[in-house]
Structure formats: structure tokens, C-alpha cells
Amino acid sequence: MEDKAVLISIHPGYTEKILSGEKRLEFRRSWVVRPVKYMVIYATSPIQRIVAVAEIKEVYSGTRARLWSLAMEKGGGISRRKLFSYLADSKNPVAIELTNIKQLESGLDPKDLFGSNFRPPQSFCYLKEDVLSQITEIL
């Protein structure tokens, strides 16, 4: 299977919560069409590095209220106000449950993988298996 991972941009405050285990769900306004098994986490500015790889255990969809209930149950790492605001205009919001999170201790400069023209994805981008292999070799 060629596209079994995605690269996703996450603000550093939330990446810290994911790495500490406080945040086990990542919320998105929309999600992938093709099934993926791994999420490669890119911490946005000022860090601007790939900081972790996580397995996707489950993807839940539903209303903001349902996703908030999941956040309370499983560890959303976000306040109700911020979650509801973030998902306000979304037609198909999801909560992605993460497991087996592996941190890249010093992080990885994405330009080393993707070249100097790298631009962080607005939502996500699929990764080819060879790119995922390069990242997991560092773990």
C-alpha cells in the first residue's frame, strides 16, 4: 500500500501535549479519503520540524458535541471553547485517536526530506512509503 501515512501540521503547544500523552486525539475539520495507518507530526513555527510519528488507532466522526465527549473520555488536550470554535464551520469534523507515538528526539528538518521548497501542509498531505521509511529509520 503506497499511501499509508500523512504529514500533518500541528501548533507546538498541541504537539507538546501529544508527546506528553495529555492529548491522544487530534481534531480536524476534514480528513483523508484513503485510509492511512500513520500520522507524521510537523510542529509549526517557531519549531518547524517533524517531531513524531504516531499510529492511527481510530478515526471518529460526528457533531462537535460528540467529539467533545470523546475528548473528555480519551484525552483531547483542548478546551471545549477552542474545540467548538475550531470546528464551527466544519461539515465532517473528526477526532483521530493516536497510539504508539514515537518522538524524534531532536526533530527532523523537513527540507532534508522534501527539499528547500518544502511548504507545510495546510491540512495534510499523503506520504509515500519511502519517505515514511526514511523518517522511521531515525526513530
Image (cartoon, rainbow, N blue to C red):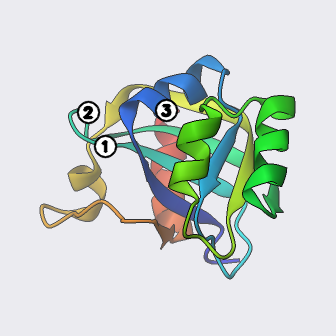
Q: Tell us which disc is closer to us: 3 or 2.
A: 3
| 30 w.r.t. 111: above or below | below
Image location of residue 35, percent across then percent down: 74, 73
The x, y position of residue 45, in whole percent, is: 23, 40
The reply, left or right, for residue 91 in relation to residue 42 is: right
Crowd rating for badge 3 (residues with CA inside 10 Å; few <14, some 14–19, many 20+) = some
Q: In this orientation, which residue lies closer to the viewer: 70 or 106?
A: 70
Q: Name the residue under label 2.
A: 47
Q: Residues within 10 Å of mark 1 (few under 14, many from 20)?
A: some
Is 90 positioned to the left or the right of 9 in the image? right
Of mark 3 and mark 2, the one earlier in the sequence is 3
Amino acid bearing label 2: Ile
* Residue to which mark 1 is pinned: 44
**In-image side of 69 versus 106 (left or right):** right
Q: Residue furthest left?
A: 116
- Structural distance between the alpha carbons of marks 1 and 3: 10 Å
Query: In what element is the residue under mark 3?
Result: helix
- Pinpoint residue 31: horizontal percent, then vertical percent: 63, 70
Using residue 48 as the reference point, say whether residue 94 is left or right of it: right
Q: Residue at x 63, y 29 (%)?
A: 77
